[in-house]
Image (tube, grey):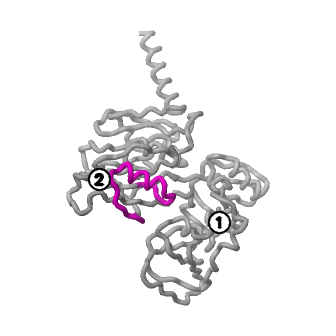
């Protein structure tokens, strides 16, 4: 009896250490029910685990595979959190793969290499280019070479509509770590880590197109993004290959990305600034290094520290590999923030004759 109790204690301690320490292994046909904080779509459990690792709260997850049969929720990835830092319940359940975030792994890769391809699976996103190629390998190469492409879908000889076979669709998702909320708030200064910058901003004024104040380009919206300034809105338009122009509403601090190859109308509208992307300039890969006074990026907190001023908060964010942006509150509290940057599909479905996958730039 005494030996059984000892073994039971060892099992319990082992289980706790796995959930609190590094545990990269995926557990097939295992469910961690409840405690969901976010539900996204994923093509496989590895993508779901990366998303969990990047989320500021997620500690563990459960992923419904393509062979899930209880309902039509295949490919759903449930990100989870508990104060105890471990699943309160673990059950056997077919069609589900579960696992833990990799934040505690000392040698975890900060890259998001997703080299697997998904046969007979269509991954939906914002299509910005289409071409015809011989096979899905060439389609993946095309996606990898195009910096705007995160995901591709290729239609092979088994696709039901012959006229669309050998089609290669390149898809874009916004992966720049943009704050999900932006608010006016006195005494708060916010900004971005300088490590996420992709280039020099020394010649930015020479490259930037003139912003058109009190001018609106109505219609043709395909995405609305919280934005602290019209310059940041222009940056978001520049890094999105589908964006042909934009309008920024000062009162609501929303950036409207727009696309059309047809006519572009404009109207006078006080408080709205509009413009064009700068991706065709030599220094169009400039980063957002500005700090925004009286602007708050609420939520997405990885951790908080005490510092003396906003500059020290920015420097702390830049030196922390897990910090993407920050908010400093007058008085000394600095919040270091992080959001998911792995491409999250808008749709994942079983579809015969379609091969999908991610770019290989991080591999």
Figure check: 98 above or below 127: above
Residue 272 % position (x, y): 57, 81
Q: Nearer the viewer, residue 94 or 354?
A: 354
Which one is closest to the eye, mark 1 or mark 2?
Answer: 1
The stretch in magenta equals 127-151
Residue 152 % position (x, y): 39, 55
Q: Secondary structure at mark 2?
A: strand
Distance from disc 1 to disc 2, alpha carbons, whole Å, reads 37 Å
Residue 233 lies left or right of residue 172; in this view the side is: right
Residue at the image position 53 percent from the left and 32 percent from the top:
22
Residue 182 lies left or right of residue 95; in this view the side is: right
Mark sitting on residue 354: 2
Q: Is residue 174 magenta?
A: no
Residue at the image position 66 percent from the left and 67 percent from the top:
295
Q: Nearer the viewer, residue 314 or 91?
A: 314
Q: Is residue 144 magenta?
A: yes
Mark 2 neighbour class, 10 Å CA radius: few under 14, some 14 to 19, many 20 or more? many
Q: Nearer the viewer, residue 324 or 282?
A: 282
Specify the quadrant of the image occupied by residue 232.
bottom right
Q: Which residue is the site of mark 1? A: 283
């Amino acid at each position: 009896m005494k030996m059984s109790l000892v073994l039971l204690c060892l099992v319990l301690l082992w289980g706790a250490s796995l959930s609190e320490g590094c545990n990269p292994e995926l557990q097939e046909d295992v469910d961690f029910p409840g405690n969901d904080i976010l539900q996204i779509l994923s093509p496989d459990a590895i993508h779901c685990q990366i998303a969990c690792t990047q989320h500021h709260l997620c500690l563990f997850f459960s992923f419904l595979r393509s062979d899930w049969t209880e309902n039509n929720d295949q490919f759903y990835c449930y990100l989870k959190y508990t104060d105890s830092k471990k699943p309160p319940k673990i059950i056997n359940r077919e069609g589900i793969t579960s696992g833990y975030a990799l934040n505690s792994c000392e040698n975890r890769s900060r890259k998001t290499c997703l080299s697997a391809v998904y046969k007979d699976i269509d991954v939906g996103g914002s299509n910005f280019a289409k071409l015809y190629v011989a096979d899905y390998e060439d389609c993946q190469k095309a996606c990898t070479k195009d910096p705007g492409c995160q995901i591709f879908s290729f239609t092979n000889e088994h696709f039901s509509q012959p006229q669309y076979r050998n089609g290669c669709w390149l898809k874009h998702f916004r992966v720049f770590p943009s704050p999900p909320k932006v608010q006016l708030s006195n005494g708060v200064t916010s900004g971005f880590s300088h490590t996420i910058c992709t280039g020099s901003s020394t010649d930015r004024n020479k490259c930037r197109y003139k912003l058109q104040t009190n001018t609106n380009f109505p219609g043709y919206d395909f995405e609305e993004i919280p934005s602290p300034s019209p310059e940041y809105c222009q940056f978001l338009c520049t890094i999105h290959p589908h964006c042909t122009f934009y309008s920024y509403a000062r009162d609501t601090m929303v950036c409207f990305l727009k696309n059309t190859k047809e006519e572009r109308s404009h109207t006078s509208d006080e408080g709205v600034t509009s413009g064009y992307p700068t991706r065709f300039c030599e220094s169009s890969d400039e980063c957002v290094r500005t700090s925004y006074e009286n602007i708050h990026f609420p939520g997405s907190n990885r951790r908080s520290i005490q510092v003396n001023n906003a500059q020290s908060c920015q420097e702390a964010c830049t030196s922390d590999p897990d910090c993407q942006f920050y908010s400093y509150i007058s008085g000394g509290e600095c919040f270091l923030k992080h959001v998911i940057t792995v491409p999250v599909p808008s749709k994942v479905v079983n579809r015969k004759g379609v091969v999908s996958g991610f770019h290989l730039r991080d591999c």
